[in-house]
Image (cartoon, rainbow, N blue to C red):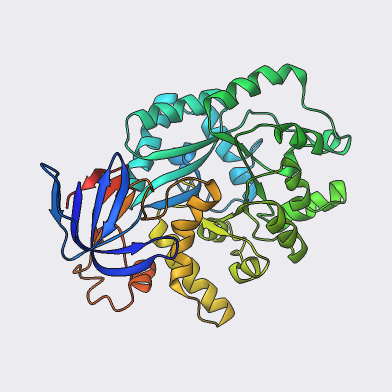
Amino acid sequence: MLIKNISALLGDELNFVSNTNIQIQNNKFKRIQPKIKPSGKEEHFDCEGLLMIPGFVNAHTHIGDSIGKDITLNSSVDKKIHPVFGAKSKILKNTSKANLTSFMKNSCYSMIRKGITTFVDFREGGLDGVILLKKVLSETPIRSIILGRIEFYQDVVQIKKNNRFPGEKIDEFNELIKKCDGIGVSGANENSTSVLNYYSKITKLRAIHSSETKQSVSRSKKNTGISETIRALSLKPHFLVHMTHASKSDLHSAAKKIRGIVICPRANSSLAEGIPDIEFMQKAGCTLALGTDNVMINSPDMFREMDFLWKATMGIHKKRINPKDILKMATVNGGKILKKNIGVIGNGKIADCIFLDKHSLDLEPMHDPYASIVHRASESTIKAVMIGGKIVHGKI
């Protein structure tokens, strides 16, 4: 396939090129240069008036709770989403697989239409939960990285005693890990350091929620005398999720040991927990990616995520932020943290991208493409979405 006469954001720095040709072969970007002619019967498209940007990488989701949208608006964080006694846990346990599947599939199509080409899901429900999501993915063209977990949580006494991972759970855990891309741990406050060390031995992706709320931070200090983030690092995670209330010391420790942090600003705000301080995190040396978190409390929309983070951060700090940095969090940085060839338009990268209509009412005239994408673009400005070299939504 040859894409002709298109504007594009290229490479790790999202460099804007006003007109180029892009050749796609075997699901990847093969050549990018102004003068490429179609070879033989190669399919080609004149894309004058369109802007190609990398497909969004939604680096943290829980789509299993898609059936419970806004069901616990006025409850506390724990009453909403605690893995043991929260409303979400009860919903997942008491809803039929058919209904869960139907609404998870809706969330996948919603993400595709909004330009999300890959999402990273912290999968509840053990092996059954992983199998359920795989069934949904077999019927939808979106790509997912599945981070599973077994339904095993420890109480304060067990954590203080540093109880080991139980032998009777080993086979269940091993079977789970075989079927998914890694492990997504609920948090350090539900696991002893011994258990986190046990989980750290797997060779696949490892990630964990950390320092999302003031309550979770203080709980760790009260129960163990150790910061929640330092305990989370016992997992030897590739990335941490949230870190909204992490200390300066926590962030410096994390920056030395992990690939990056996935932040979920709208979800944190909808839980009345504030938003992550991205300037604080970047100064500590952390690479940041964006996620939309639970569908139950937040829509899976990266356009909204970028717009909110950009403006809320500038409003709080009264200081300008380059919108390109925000766009990187939704694309390039997700690929970096996952160590996947996604989130970038470049030779050899997987051909995931969004085609935006530069002449749409909300975008024209586009004086600054980064600002236009971050706070003006939306689902309505998308002409088409490509995943792995195939148009899966719209047309060009």
Question: How far across and down, in percent of the image, does residue 381 sit?
Answer: 25, 61
Visible residue check, residue 74 = yes
Q: Specify the farthest residue to the left.
A: 41
Foreground pick, 270 / 284: 284
Question: Is residue 333 shown above or below 165?
Answer: below
Relative placement, left or right, of 123 versus 234 is: left
Question: How far across and down, in percent of the image, does residue 375 sit?
Answer: 38, 70
Q: Residue at x 70, y 20 (%)?
A: 170
Question: How far across and down, in percent of the image, does residue 333 sit?
Answer: 50, 57
Quadrant hosting residue 37: bottom left
Question: Is residue 18 shown above or below 350?
Answer: below
Quadrant hosting residue 316: bottom right
Foreground pick, 189 / 326: 326
Question: Is residue 92 shown above or below 24?
Answer: above
Relative placement, left or right, of 306 versus 232 is: left
Q: How many marks?
A: 0
Q: Residue at x 80, y 39 (%)?
A: 193
Relative placement, left or right, of 64 versus 379 is: right
Quadrant hosting residue 25: top left
Foreground pick, 267 / 328: 328
Relative placement, left or right, of 395 versus 392 is: left
Q: Residue at x 72, y 58 (%)?
A: 214
Question: How far across and down, in percent of the image, does residue 286 sit?
Answer: 63, 61
